[in-house]
Image (cartoon, helix red, strand yellow):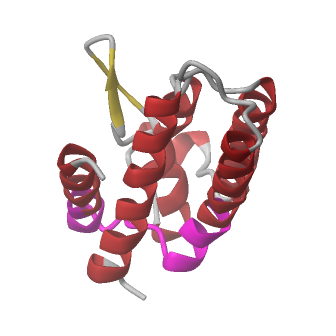
Amino acid sequence: MSREDIKRAENLIKVAEKNAMLPTTTQLRKIFSQINNLKNTYEMEKLNGNIVDGKLSDKILDDLEYLKMQVAYQCGRVKPNDFEIKNKKINNKSALWWFINKLPHYEYKDKKISFILYLSTIKTVKDMDNFFDYTEALIAYQKFYGRD
């Protein structure tokens, strides 16, 4: 597990908590249970020899796109209206949307990007392993600093 990923996750959770926009454990668990399903598929693909030379299989890349869609759906369920976004009056119900879409989860090509965009950067085994470490740390620190 990368110390950098763990520290990045802790700092992000602290920022969300400081802004009173930390999603509930339940909101994050819905997404992270889907990530665990992806991790199980990933481990099976590795065992079956479908991941070669550090490149992810088409099945895993397809599952990443599906995960991206599922995250978008969960965030869309709690998306604040345009007035709230424009006036920065997002409420706790919208915390998941804010956390996934507005906080910089990752730096890619010298640009800080959201969680959904982060999913699009995962192309190699190393990327995938770092992603799993990062999401595991997010859950741990959310539970520690969280409001529920």
Relative to 39, say whether 60 is above or below.
above
Q: Is residue 122 left or right of residue 70?
A: left
Nearer-the-camera pick, 39 or 109: 39
From the image, which quarter does the C terminus lie in? bottom left
Residue at 38%, 61% (x, y): give it: 138
Q: How many marks?
A: 0
Q: Is residue 135 left or right of residue 45?
A: left
Residue 90 visible in rendering: yes
Residue 89 visible in rendering: no
Nearer-the-camera pick, 109 or 22: 109
Residue at 69%, 36% (x, y): give it: 64
Spot occupied by residue 46 in the image (x, y as percentages of width and height): 66, 41
Spot occupied by residue 75 in the image (x, y as percentages of width and height): 64, 51
Task: Assign the magenta stretch its main secondary structure.
Answer: helix
Q: Quadrant of residue 26?
A: bottom right
Q: Quadrant of residue 14?
A: bottom left
Spot occupied by residue 89 in the image (x, y as percentages of width and height): 41, 54
Q: Does 116 lie within the magenta span? A: no
Relative to 122, say whether 70 is above or below.
below
Nearer-the-camera pick, 55 or 102: 55
Boundaries of the magenta span: 14-31
Q: Is residue 42 left or right of residue 96?
A: right
- Residue placed furthest toward the top: 109
Nearer-the-camera pick, 17 or 91: 17
Spot occupied by residue 126 in the image (x, y as percentages of width and height): 43, 31
Residue at 49%, 47% (x, y): give it: 100
Q: Does 16 lie within the magenta span? A: yes
Residue at 19%, 44% (x, y): give it: 4
- Residue placed furthest toward the bottom: 148
